């Protein structure tokens, strides 16, 4: 089913034509939780996604200014998940063992947030620096004794660090590079700061998993790019780098860790070509596959809305669990407000007592969930399902049931 009048844009990576395949409608800032007394109009933008006809990069059709998303009150604290704490401690140890092996290594992180990864680097006595423009999360990292620069990483700030600290052996980023439309400036910054044989390692939600699971809620203002190995390889090659390794990760619903080195310095692992072959076999970057994804998203939207309306008609009590940025896409696309989901439980103090973006569902402390009178819990933080189910076992034992919408709407 082809639409002859698809909106088109210009690729942020190669300048080619970006062809839209999914429109998720007007959406708010996914991490902007309002207080009940705020009266000024909420910021909304058109959330639509397209794929570049030339380099295959999947990207948003419209960009939200970075200062609207990342600022003093940015409320996402990476250490809020025990599973993620372990993931980042393991990651840091691996990087220290394999890459930071010289006499006085230097590790830089882009988007270090509350210091969940750099903490382990610092404990090992290794020189480090985090870039973190969001004020309160950066303050949390500093309070843990970490060295943090409160700037956006880009060419100019990277050069300033190179002048003061010398070259970095590793530049690492998790769930941050896909947030950055101005990637050319990032890559020029990496070029300026990275040692000749250093590596740039970043991990982000993987397009292959997003399509396989129909996890359309991975699409929101902050997730500007949905990377695949093919699109990242092309991006690297166009800026003097080479994709030399890929590793699939189970976290956040399926990610890939990409390792870039300067072109010609390291032999690419066989895993790179293997993953690209897998992507080609699944048609990951074809418009036909992306159109099928868009159709599946429409089905989930209709099924979830129908289920919640039925439960309301039956007088069942439904609450949300995890006031994730992802849930902004789901609730705003499906029109889920406090009439269908009475509140959302979440462990983050910066979100509690506030209202969800756009749909204004009250956020309550997660430790109230155990005593809440709830029949169904809609699991917005499905990527943390194992961790949450383990600590909320009493809910199901008392007759409660979980609703999930990835990869399709189901009750368990
Ligand atoms: N790395 C952490 C993790 O994986 O949990 C934090 C991820 S959080 C979703 C993205 C972080 O990147 C935010 O803390 C934001 O302030 C930061 N960020 C956004 N643009 C950035 C840039 N250009 N340079 C450095 N940090 C940036
Ligand atoms: P994320 O999916 O972007 O990591 O966001 C997870 C959200 O869910 C965040 O607001 C913290 C919250 N959360 C809980 O409320 N309980 C939990 O056990 C976990 C792991 C996260
Ligand atoms: Zn392109």
Image: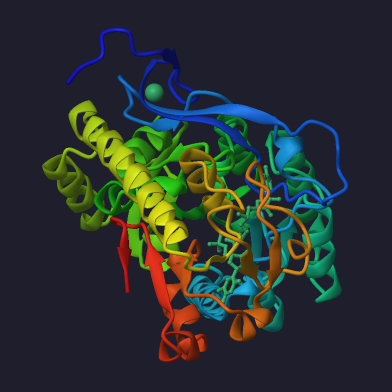
> Residue 256: x, y in percent?
38, 56
Q: Splitting the image into 4 quarters, where does residue 296 fall?
A: top left
Please name whichever residue, 254 or 375, is drawn nearer the observer in this view of the structure.
Answer: 375
Name of the residue lying farthest toward the left: 281
- Above-or-below relation of 246 to 286: below
- Above-or-below relation of 73 to 43: below
Identify the residue shown where x is 64% and y is 39%.
189
Identify the residue shown where x is 53% and y is 52%.
327
Confirm whether residue 265 shows in the render: no
> Residue 77: x, y in percent?
69, 65
Please name whichever residue, 74 or 294, is drawn nearer the observer in this view of the structure.
Answer: 294
> Residue 55: x, y in percent?
33, 26
Residue 66 placement, left or right of 91:
right
Residue 86 placement, left or right of 136:
left
Name of the residue lying farthest toward the front: 314
Coloured how? rainbow
**Badge count:** 0
Confirm whether residue 331 shows in the render: yes
The C terminus, quarter of image: bottom left
Residue 186 placement, left or right of 95:
right
> Residue 270: x, y in percent?
21, 56
Identify the residue shown where x is 74% and y is 43%.
152
Identify the residue shown where x is 38% and y is 56%.
310
Please name whichever residue, 172 or 296, is drawn nearer the observer in this view of the structure.
Answer: 296
Please name whichever residue, 124 or 266, is drawn nearer the observer in this view of the structure.
Answer: 124
Q: Splitting the image into 4 quarters, where does residue 288 fall?
A: top left
The N terminus, quarter of image: top left
Residue 61 placement, left or right of 230:
right
Q: Splitting the image into 4 quarters, where does residue 311 fall?
A: bottom left
């Amino acid at each position: 089913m082809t639409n002859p009048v698809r909106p088109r844009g210009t690729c942020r990576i190669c300048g080619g034509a970006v062809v839209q395949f999914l429109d998720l409608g007007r959406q708010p800032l996914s991490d902007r939780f309002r207080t009940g007394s705020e009266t000024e109009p909420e910021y909304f933008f058109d959330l639509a996604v397209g794929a570049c006809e030339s380099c295959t990069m999947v990207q948003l059709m419209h960009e939200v200014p970075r200062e609207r998303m990342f600022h003093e009150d940015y409320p996402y604290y990476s250490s809020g998940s025990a599973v993620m704490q372990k993931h980042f401690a393991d990651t840091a140890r691996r990087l220290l063992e394999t890459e930071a092996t010289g006499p006085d290594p230097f590790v830089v992180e882009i988007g270090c947030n509350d210091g969940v990864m750099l903490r382990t680097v610092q404990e090992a006595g290794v020189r480090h620096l985090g870039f973190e423009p969001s004020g309160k999360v950066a303050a949390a990292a500093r309070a843990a004794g970490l060295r943090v620069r409160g700037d956006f990483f880009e060419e100019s700030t990277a050069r300033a660090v190179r002048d003061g600290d010398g070259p970095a052996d590793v530049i690492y980023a998790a769930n941050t590079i896909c947030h950055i439309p101005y990637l050319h400036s990032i890559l020029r910054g990496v070029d300026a700061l990275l040692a000749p044989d250093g590596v740039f390692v970043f991990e982000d939600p993987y397009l292959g998993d997003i399509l396989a699971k129909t996890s359309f809620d991975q699409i929101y203002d902050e997730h500007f790019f949905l990377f695949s190995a093919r699109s990242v390889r092309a991006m690297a090659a166009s800026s003097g780098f080479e994709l030399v390794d890929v590793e699939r990760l189970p976290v956040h619903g399926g990610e890939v860790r990409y390792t870039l080195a300067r072109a010609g310095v390291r032999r690419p692992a066989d895993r790179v070509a293997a993953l690209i072959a897998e992507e080609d076999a699944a048609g990951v970057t074809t418009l036909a596959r992306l159109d099928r994804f868009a159709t599946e998203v429409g089905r989930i939207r209709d099924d979830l809305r129908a289920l919640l309306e039925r439960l309301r008609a039956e007088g069942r009590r439904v609450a949300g669990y995890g006031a994730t940025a992802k849930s902004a896409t789901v609730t705003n696309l499906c029109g889920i407000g406090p009439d269908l989901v009475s509140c959302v439980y979440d462990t983050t103090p910066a979100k509690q007592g506030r209202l969800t973006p756009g749909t204004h569902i009250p956020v309550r402390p997660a430790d109230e969930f155990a005593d809440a009178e709830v029949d169904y819990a809609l699991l917005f933080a499905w990527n943390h399902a194992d961790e949450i189910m383990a600590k909320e076992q009493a809910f199901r034992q008392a007759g409660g049931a979980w609703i999930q919408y990835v990869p399709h709407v189901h009750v368990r």
